[in-house]
Image (spheres, rainbow, N blue to C red):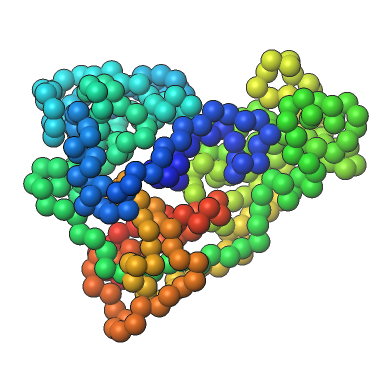
Amino acid sequence: MRTKLAVMALGVLFGLWPQVSQACRCLTQPNDTNLAQALRTAREAASHIYFARVQAADGLRSGNATVEVLEVLKGELAVGTRLRLPSGGGGSCAYPFKKGNDYLVYAHGGPTAVRMCTRTRPILADDVELQWLRTGKLPATPSALRREVVTCKPCDLNAVARAPALFQNDARQAHAARRAFWTQGLGSENGRAVAVGQSKDLRAFELVQTPHEATDEKCRQRIVRRWCERLAPLSSKAQFPFRCINPGPEEQVCDENKDRVSKWMPLESMTTATCTWDDPNAPSCKLSKKVQPRPGPHKASAPLLRCSLPREDTGWHHCQVITGE
């Protein structure tokens, strides 16, 4: 979930990983909750704003991307210019550009001074924010919202492992003392989380939870397990403490999709929401804890905001502006 409240590039899963990584945190700006003001403030603060296509990207947590400027919206810059931008995400707060995608880029201090904690994001040529920058016509603000309530039987590593989650050194000590534990394992990236450990009956295991970073939706997680012949300790300088040796066949342990139940609640007025409009098409919103049905006609005029609770129970909802029901 990317909001100005907290944009995080984490190598951890839902705060459960014992291995702590550096994170990029962005503070909420005072006027973020007002779409018109957020757009105007961002335009005034930026030294350069441009529409660009990524020609090449390192694909690393700390690398670079080469972009071609397709359109200049603010600042001294020529169309067709190629710029080398910091890329990759992680603790450096560099934006994670992807080759072939088009981006609306906000730079501060110079055309290559681009960071994650800005309005920089991937867009299409007809994006409403791009149209506003071209014409000055503000995107329409939703007149009502509808929230989704999702329930399922939880499927997470803590519940499945049935053992304490430990830091590297503590995990090594538990392994040597033949105690149950789990810790972060090799391959914990690219949309999946991997855990290794030993069960209460001292069987070595590897768990893989997906889709992890691939989606923030609630009740979409799945975990598979492989029993290992043993856990091999790695160097004390290694990022992960153990490797699973000779893993057996995969067995599905749990899948939240199987009993996922989704229900859309009655229409509510926008006064029940406080939103950060990093993306005018898809803001992140804090909704009142209690559903407050809107009095009057049941049909909403366009546009409407539909909000789904993310996987992490932070209280922030992922919302989408739609043209109608």
Residue 173 found in image quarter: top right
Residue 282 visible (yes or no) = no
Residue 278 visible (yes or no) = yes
The residue located at (91%, 29%) in the rendering is 177
Nearer the observer, 85 or 60:
85
Q: Is 205 situated left or right of 280 in this image?
A: right
Q: Is 306 situated left or right of 168 in this image?
A: left
Q: Is 212 situated left or right of 240 in this image?
A: left
In this view, which residue lies farthest toward the front?
30
Q: In the image, residue 136 lies at what x, y percent?
A: 10, 48
Nearer the observer, 112 or 125:
112
Q: Is residue 226 above or below residue 22?
A: below
Residue 124 found in image quarter: top left
Q: Is residue 119 above or below residue 92?
A: below
Nearer the observer, 255 or 291:
291
Residue 111 found in image quarter: top left
In this view, which residue lies farthest toward the left?
135
Q: In the image, residue 106 lies at what x, y percent?
A: 25, 33
The residue located at (24%, 40%) in the rendering is 42
Q: In the image, residue 122 lies at what x, y percent?
A: 30, 39
Q: Is 105 situated left or right of 259 in this image?
A: left
Q: Is residue 200 above or below residue 218?
A: above
Q: Is residue 30 above or below residue 70?
A: below
The residue located at (65%, 22%) in the rendering is 239
The residue located at (40%, 78%) in the rendering is 293
Q: In the image, residue 311 lies at what x, y percent?
A: 54, 52
- Quadrant location of the C terminus? bottom left
